[in-house]
């Protein structure tokens, strides 16, 4: 079946640096993508999403980029803070009404921010 | 605002015992509901989803079952737990825009 995977399982950065977390997806028909942050022992927290008719979307300190040509998704975190340390997951949703909102998740990237 | 609850937060059960995990959503009506399992250090695996009361779809064959007795209640069950059922169980709901939000999770340990 379709899969979503991450290039880098771990990422260590210094506080204040910018972080980039990457994700590759295989289902070219996916029309919606989400980034989640998961802290230890907690449920995933919605960060930002992007639909397939967009290339870029910005939030507070975060930017998601979508390159449909190479089926690549990235999450950029500006001025990374220790509180950003967590596991980050990308997820994709197939197009069409029969998808019922089901998401396929990547493996996750562990982001560690050093003070 | 909408909130999602799961209980219990943690559970330790012996092999062969039954299981019942509950998820409830507040502040919305007729949400799509989902059960996921997350093994330690891994991603999320979709187990079940429901688009309405009494409507359950299973994504993977397994030892678990799900039920939706009320619009905003989703229950994950098992008659006899296996060691491999250990994990972090997450309930989620989806809004009109397909944004999916997760509950706090239940940590299940089967001994």
Image (spheres, coloured by chain):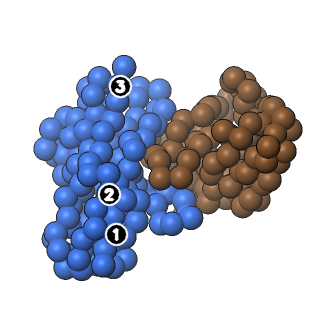
Chain colours: A brown, B blue
Residue at 84% across, 35% down: A16
- B84, above or below B77, in the image: below
Q: Are marks 3 and 2 in contact (CB under 8 Å)?
A: no
The quarter of the displayed image where residue A100 is located: top left
Chain bearing tag 1 is B
- A103, above or below B97, in the image: below
What percent of the width, then of the height, locates residue B21?
A: 24, 54
The quarter of the displayed image where residue B23 is located: top left
Residue at 62% across, 32% down: A48
Q: Which residue has dot 2 on it?
A: B10
Q: Are marks 2 and 1 in contact (CB under 8 Å)?
A: yes
Give the class, few, some or many, for how many residues have Cα within 10 Å of label 2's Cα (few <14, many ≥20). few
| Labels 2 and 1: the sequence-earlier one | 2
Q: Which residue has dot 1 on it?
A: B109
Chain bearing tag 2 is B
Give the mark toward the camera: 3 or 2: 2
Residue at 68% across, 24% down: A59
Seen from the viewer's position, the closer of residues A82 and A25 is A82
Quarter of the rendering occupied by the C terminus of chain A: top right
Chain bearing tag 3 is B
């Amino acid at each position: 079946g379709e899969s979503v995977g991450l290039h880098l399982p771990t990422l260590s950065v210094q506080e204040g640096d910018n972080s980039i977390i990457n994700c590759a997806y295989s289902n070219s028909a996916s029309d919606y993508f989400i980034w989640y942050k998961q802290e230890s022992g907690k449920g995933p927290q919605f960060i930002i999403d992007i639909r397939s008719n967009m290339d870029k979307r910005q939030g507070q300190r975060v930017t998601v980029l979508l390159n449909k040509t190479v089926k690549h998704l990235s999450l950029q975190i500006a001025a990374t803070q220790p509180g950003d340390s967590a596991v980050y997951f990308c997820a994709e949703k197939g197009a069409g009404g029969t998808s019922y909102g089901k998401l396929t998740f990547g493996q996750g990237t562990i982001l560690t921010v050093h003070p | 605002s909408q909130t999602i609850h799961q209980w219990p937060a943690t559970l330790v059960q012996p092999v062969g015992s039954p299981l019942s995990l509950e998820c409830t959503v507040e502040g919305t009506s007729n949400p799509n509901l989902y059960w996921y399992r997350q093994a330690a250090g891994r991603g999320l695996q979709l187990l079940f989803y429901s688009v309405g009361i009494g409507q359950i779809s299973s994504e993977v064959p397994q030892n678990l079952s799900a039920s939706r007795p009320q619009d905003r209640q989703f229950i994950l069950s098992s008659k006899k737990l296996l060691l491999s059922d250990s994990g972090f169980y997450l309930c989620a709901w989806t809004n009109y825009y397909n944004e999916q939000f997760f509950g706090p999770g239940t940590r299940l340990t089967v001994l």
